[in-house]
Image: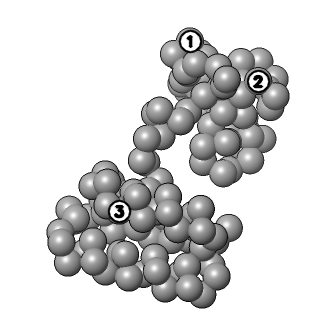
Amino acid sequence: MGMRPYLADMAHCHAQESLTIMSISIELERLAELHRSGRLSDDEYMRAKAGVLGGGTGPASVNMGNRLRRSRSDRWFGGVCGGIAQVTGLASWAWRLGFVLLAVCAGTGLLAYLLLWIFVPLND
């Protein structure tokens, strides 16, 4: 919604160059402008700002490994797709479709799903 285009743009920029003091300043100014214009909620603004100041590769990947949990409510088998959907904001049906397509094409979707089912803990 409001933050997705910004995150995609930021991930692209950070993949091409490392953060410098100047780019951090520019990113913070962009975030503040998006927040002032109402395109970012207070919560989105704080999370994105923490991601920029945290020195990671951008807000999209900040603590993703720590937040990823299998869903107890949005599940068909192990809750993997529901958990990924909660972290990424992409609908769980899209993740399910992606895993099925990968399983049909090369078998990697099934392997990836099983590994995530084993190693990703359940949501509390």
Q: Considering only order in the chain, which callout, 3 or 2, is on the residue closer to the N terminus?
A: 3
Q: How many C-alpha atoms fall within 10 Å of the one at disc 1: few (<14), some, or many (≥20)? A: few
Displayed quadrant of residue 95: top right
- Measured in 3D between alpha carbons, the distance from the residue under mark 3 to the one under mark 1, in whole angstroms, is 32 Å
Residue at image position (35%, 75%) is 27
Residue 72's tag is 2
Residue pictured at 42% horizontal, 65% vertical: 49
Q: Quadrant of residue 63?
A: top left
| 4 with respect to 18 (left or right) | right
Is 76 above or below relative to 2? Answer: above
Image height of 121 relative to 61, above or below: above
Give the residue pinned by disc 1.
Answer: 118
* Mark nearer the N terminus (3 vs 1): 3
Amino acid type at image mark 2:
Arg
Q: Residue at 18% of width from left, 72% of height from top? A: 21
Q: Which residue is mark 3?
A: 52
Q: Position of residue 62 (x, y in %)?
A: 42, 47
Q: Amino acid at mark 1?
A: Ile
Residue closest to the eye, 123 or 42: 42
The mark lying in front, picked from 3 and 1, is 3
Distance between the Cα atoms at labels 2 and 3? 31 Å
Whether residue 110 is visible here, answered yes or no, is no
Q: Whole-Å distance between the Cαs marked 2 and 1?
A: 15 Å
Left or right: 5 as drawn, with respect to 25: right
Q: How far across and how far down the image is residue 114, in percent?
A: 59, 15
Residue sitting nearer the eye, 8 or 39:
39
